Amino acid sequence: METSTHGAAKRRKRRKEFEQKAMTNIYVWVRTSRSLQFFYPTVDVEKDDPFSTYFEVAMDVIGLMKECDRISSEEFETMCKGRIPGVYTEAIFQNAVEHGNINARLKLLVFSLLFAAIQQRTPDLAKSNRNDIVLTRISKYFGPIFKLLFQLDVGKRLQDRDIVQAIGSGQGYEFLDVLFEGTIKHKHGNSNHHGVRPLSLIVPLILDKVNSISLPFLCNEIRRHLIKDPYHIDEFASEKSPQIFSTVRRTTLAHNSRRVVHLHYINRIEVLRKDEFANVHLRICNDKPKASFVFVPLRCETVFLDSLFYTQWILLGAVRGIVIVKNCQNTRISVSCEQLIILDSKNLEIHFMSPKKPLISSSVGITLAPFNTIYEGQEEFLEENGHYFNNNLVFKEPIIFSSGSWTMDTSKFVCQSTPLDAMDQQFETLLNSLPEEYRIAHYRNTIEAQKMMAVEPEKCRVSDVATNFDLLYLKSKIEKKEEEE
């Protein structure tokens, strides 16, 4: 009787474990912070898939790790010569250079090579957007990626059997956490009891009850749980459902570092000063013919500008990560960020400050100049981002992907005022950060503009006058509100 009771208890326990496992959904995705850190314009591949070439170069880089932890651009160019196009070589290298260094860190170089490899648009993905391309190619090459990450973690090249043996000996799966994360949800409800977790904490559940593993089996089990980033951080609004445009503003409910704020239907003036716009991923898409001025003085994680055709001036004062300008035209943009990327745009005047060279793809009529404005509180935000006005001192020529054209033009350069006050000392900081030719141009053009306004105001550009009226109007409204408070 006791034996029967004991057997029944074991069966109930096994059935309960099976039911719990069956009631659990597991989701795994690429860390968005990594995906955007190594963002490249997708390039159409007409013939052979180049993944294996990028993978081999990455393995060569890992082979150097026992001797050093950084290499120069000349050394990397030599490694890539005849294997990776020169444009990609330069972009891959600069994404692996940390602030204050001129040489690339080997570990970051491996990541940079990997993301360049998975953002290639092969013929079978001709109609896919970047998110679909990345997910499809990571799934396709998950086995090699798994081995690459493990060897990167241990700092040397290994055979497959050595990798399996190391994992079986208790090595663990922490090496996957640099690229992947995920969550566990129960099918009987919407609650998520665990939140976002590193993949290493999820793998044991994926492999629950498995007695032995092989490398192909392990990779396949993880791969089948891959999904797109559920926070939709690296998606363009123009590639999403039209329903997203049903309201002027749409905000996801994630916490700040994952929160995405969509702003649509810009009309005349937008100044995003409320706390809801601080430390978020901001997506500004679509504007109306009367749109004039968008000012984002707060610190943001990343910003996408998408399909803007009428706005006269956009000011992004302190973006920690990348800023992507896609399908925009006939506007002026002032931006401080980690890296600027311009896609499918034309006739833009961009004043930028960043530690990296901008990337330009399929864009024409792009005029580039140093960052040209300052306001109260901006320097504190920049310092929090690890950015400084000395990034403005040396002009960085862009890296051109695909077709593209750009120019430098000091003839019209002038530092711009904003609705938020800046002290004389702060304005001097801005002027001292400019390359000499732009500093001279500012003084010259300011004097000429003052004379023209006094003598022949009808010769001033209508767009500049309209923008100035808007700024004066906006400044008076802000000052009035501050007095009331």
Image (cartoon, rainbow, N blue to C red):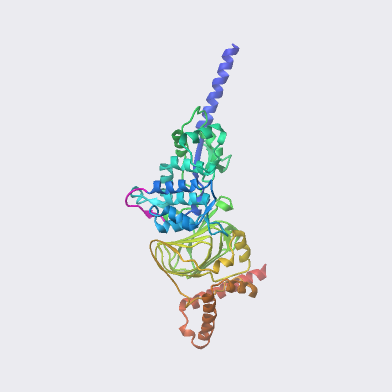
Q: Residue 472, can we see it?
A: yes
In this picture, which residue range is highlighted in magenta? 41-49
Residue depicted at 58% across the width and 15% down the height: 5
Residue depicted at 42% across the width and 53% down the height: 80
Which residue in the rendered view is the most extreme toward the front?
67
> Residue 340, image x and y in percent?
49, 62
Question: In which quadrant of the rendered view does residue 378 lie?
Answer: bottom right
> Residue 457, image x and y in percent?
49, 85
Whether 75 is drawn above or below 297: the answer is above
Q: Residue 306, can we see it?
A: no
Query: Does the magenta stretch mainly form a helix, a strand or a loop?
Result: loop
Identify the image quadrant of the C terminus: bottom right
Question: In which quadrant of the rendered view does residue 419 lie?
Answer: bottom right
> Residue 370, image x and y in percent?
52, 70
Would you say residue 423 sits in the magenta stretch?
A: no
Residue depicted at 56% across the width and 71% down the height: 373
Would you say residue 45 sits in the magenta stretch?
A: yes
410 vs 430, left or right, is left
Q: Nearer the viewer, residue 261 or 409?
A: 409
Which residue in the rendered view is the most extreme toward the left?
47
> Residue 287, image x and y in percent?
46, 65
Which residue in the rendered view is the most extreme toward the top?
1
Q: Nearer the viewer, residue 271 or 157?
A: 157
Whether 416 is drawn above or below 28: the answer is below
Q: How many numbered tags mark residues here?
A: 0
Identify the image quadrant of the N terminus: top right
